[in-house]
Image (cartoon, rainbow, N blue to C red):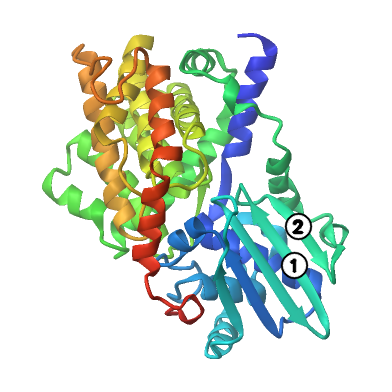
Amino acid sequence: MDAASYQNHLQILREELVCALGCTEPIAVALAAALATRVLGCEPERLEVSCSGNIIKNVKSVTVPNSDGMRGIRAATVLGAIGGDASAALEVFEGVGPQDIARTRELLADSSYCLVSLAQDVPNLYVRVMAQGQGHTAVSCIRDRHTNVSELTLDGKDARSSVAGNSRQEEADGSQDSTADRSAITLSSIWEFAHTARLEDIDELISQQVTLNKAISDEGLKGSWGSSIGATLLRSRPEDVTCKARAAAAAGSDARMSGCPLPVMIVCGSGNQGITCSLPVLEYAHDLWADHQTLVRAVALSDLTAVHVKYYIGELSAFCGAVSAACGAGAGICYLRGGDFDDYGDTVVNTLANVGGIVCDGAKPSCAAKVSASVDAAILACDQAFAKKTFRAGDGLVGQDPEETIRSMGYVGRVGMQPTDVEILNIMIGKTDLSNECY
């Protein structure tokens, strides 16, 4: 692998593996509100938030972390404005205290304090917050990526300089001017990188991903979070590695979706995907007695495979991201089991042929069940690959090679499922008045 390609793969990992506290869509809403409030310089007297349909879909039913159980866009916006740390990027809620929660509830009691609207003809990931106070108006807009601040103004004038030096937010904002070219990677280049990467280049980042994501998974298994999918799985087959792999990922998702205030390392802008890419691989590494270096390489392979599959789908769609992340998990498991490059490609194909097209109907506890199902499909896909029982070209969307299959499935997720996404949103919000969400 030449130096430029090596650095590109490494940069993708650095940009994708970001620490986040809570589901990333309400976090993006809160971050926009916190930035607008910081620029305004006082507690807002009125807030307006306009979001894309996919943001509304993913915030509607998920619990906002550190909020004492509040849900919805209004809760995320107001708590972000009142107690959010604009410098903390996707950990904007880490410093929220009881007084912030109490003040948020007080303000939410006034249905006119924070107005929510559906933005039309905008990217799938889009949040715009307008904060008014003391005769001034501040506007913050995040689009395309969860930390990409495309607009920050005070009374119509650019106000970016007022938040200069905001450590984690400045670092996260680098994603808007990404130096990594995700279109340049392939399964072949990912396979080569995973085998040849210098351990010192990836160890710290991958180890942090495994450590953080295991912590929230452990909490999900021992606590009563969401639908307790992980614990339910383990009750039936506690010693089965396939069951443990599914349970570990599902438990982390259950805790996250239900407001657990522990940070995770995200992939493809999603904590659920970051968890799915890492924890099933960790369980198999333990079962196979793999050493630390092998685990790190397997998780790096998983992360990059997920990024590659997700690239063709795009940010936030009707295509459940657990599927692309499970492709990564299956790839990492294949690596740990001693598979070759053909087995790797076949594992990805078999996963997509099985569960490609699971719909995303927003962030909520059932995401954990979808994570479990997707990981189960990935493990089966790997077993198929080792048995040389891979789905053939022409079987549905399966192409002549793995890359063609990935592109075809990506097209369905990005273009073909657009009408599905619209109808899912219509059903979810229906006649709901967005300005009077439950909190």
Front-lying residue, 342 or 196: 342
The residue located at (53%, 40%) in the rendering is: 208
Is residue 201 visible in the rendered image? The answer is no
Label 1 sits on what residue type?
Val
Give the distance between the C-alpha atoms of the residues marked 1 and 2, in whole angstroms.
7 Å
Question: In what quadrant of the picture does the N terminus appear?
Answer: top right
Mark identifier at residue 380? none
435 left or right of 398 in image: right
- Say how many tags the image has: 2
Where does residue 312 sit, x and y in percent of width and height? Answer: 49, 31
Callouts 1 and 2 close, C-beta under 8 Å: yes
Q: Position of residue 159 (x, y in %)?
A: 85, 62
Picture coordinates of residue 68 (x, y %)?
Answer: 46, 76
311 vs 287, nearest the viewer: 311
Residue, disc 1:
139
Q: Residue at x 37, y 22 (%)?
A: 405
User: What is the quadrant of residue 175 in the picture?
Assistant: top right
Tell me which label, 1 or 2, sits earlier in the chain. 1
* Residue 142 locus on image (x, y percent): 66, 56
In this rendering, is residue 417 above or below 88? above
Residue lying at 52% horizontally and 34% vertically, measured from the top left: 206
Q: Provide the secondary structure element on which disc 1 rests.
A: strand
How crowded pointer 2 is (Cα within 10 Å; few <14, some 14-19, many 20+) is rated as: some
Seen as rendered, the residue at the extreme left is 236
Q: Residues within 10 Å of mark 1 (few under 14, many from 20)?
A: many
Looking at the rendered structure, the kind of residue marked 2 is Glu
Residue beneath the point at 31% across and 52% down:
368
Labelled disc at residue 151: 2
Residue 248 horizontal side relative to residue 383, left or right: right
Residue 71 quadrant: bottom left
